[in-house]
Image: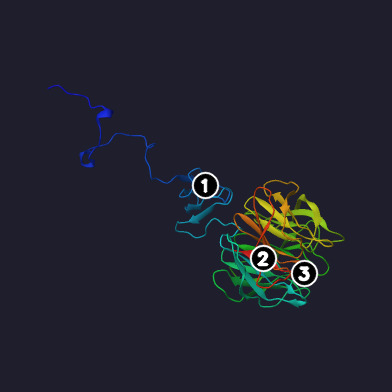
Amino acid sequence: MSSTKLKTANIVSLDATKLTGTLPAISGANLTGIAPFTVSASDPAVATNPSGGVGTIWMNSTSGETYILTDATAGSNVWINVGSGSGDVWRFQGTIAGFTSGGQVSSTKSVVIDKFTFGSSSNATDHGDLTVARTYLAGQSSATHGYTSGGAPYGTNIIDKFTFGSSANATDHGDLVVSRTECAGQSSATHGYTSGGDAPPRTNVIEKFSFASAGYSTDFGDLTVARSSVAGQSSTTHGYTTGGYNSGSKDIIDRFSFSSSGNATDVGNLVTARHAVAGQSSATDGYISGGGFSPSFDNINKFAFASSANGTDHGTLSVSRQDAAGQSSTTHGYTSGGNADSNVIDRFTFGASNNATDVGDLSVGRRFLTGQQY
């Protein structure tokens, strides 16, 4: 009996029931609907930009932790832990809301914690109260809670903690080793840091406290120069303390590692020496906005986390001001409140240089305040 070879062009469809026996090895190049998969000895980072985009699976072959990419924003990716362990890939930036806490209204110190939504132009609402009314304080953020440390009345050592998820008053979380005011805050995945400030005298001390458990902070290291009225920024691996005042305004950009105790190093200079400033952080760059005094600045500076380099001009605020608070989403920096009891919430885009726009008002206009993000 003669046989006829079946050509590819003659195959219109093939019933799956006819596929029996052992299939030959075939290329998977044309398979669809399968998420990209990466095996690595380490966790992904917010700056890990996979070509597969949302849905990419990443397995850490060392720890066994597995992550899925849920937001593919270049340099600000969101990796969610779906393994048996816990802990998403941490990032300092928030995705939901910014918070502004403490400050001063006219001559009265404030307990107010405000909350405003990222991604939309809207006014802030009252989220709760601090345990003690105070000004010139530092702000820190974990994945679930906001923290405020130090402040005035002069030489406060209080560390407050409040929940992001629901409106509630803060609770006392612990105490700083050095009571101080006009200090800066930084945040790693597990700890908050308080740097610089006025004790008095002005201090160079960097302190560290645990997010997970209440208690005293510990001495972590020293800044290169003791100074007050500083701003704080955070990458995934380092804290930064910028600007400040000590016998004049400073243009210093200090950097210290989160991984182990140690002193900061000077890694660059701001475009303009300034103090009474607000700090913001993208996944790749630090920002510093406003400052003063006489007159106050409207300038926004930007500096790269990856290299030791000087700051560059990024844009301007909608209103010149000092003594404002800074907040950071994954895509934008925010500057809220400030001199003359301002209630303005400004927003500027990370990345390309641009000017800030007014996107809302605080529930109470005030200055000498600090910020957090969720």
First in sequence: mark 3 or mark 1?
1
Name above or below for residue 110 compared with residue 297. Answer: below
Report the residue at 60% width, 54% height from top. Answer: 331
Inspect this view and state whether residue 81 appears.
yes
Across and down, in percent, residue 256 comes to: 71, 55
Q: Which residue is mark 3?
A: 340
Residue farthest toward the top in the current orientation of the protein: 2
Circle 3 or circle 1, nearest the eye: 3
- Display coloring: rainbow
Circle 3 or circle 2, nearest the eye: 3
Q: Which labelled disc corresponds to residue 41?
A: 1
How far apart are labels 3 and 1 at the CA level? 52 Å
The amino acid sitting under disc 3 is Ala
How far apart are labels 3 and 2 at the CA level? 18 Å
Q: Nearer the viewer, residue 158 or 335?
A: 335
Say what secondary structure mark 1 lies in.
loop
The amino acid sitting under disc 1 is Ala
How far apart are labels 2 and 1 at the CA level? 35 Å
Answer whether labels 2 and 1 touch (C-beta < 8 Å).
no
Q: Which residue is mark 2?
A: 371
Report the residue at 81% width, 55% height from top. Answer: 273
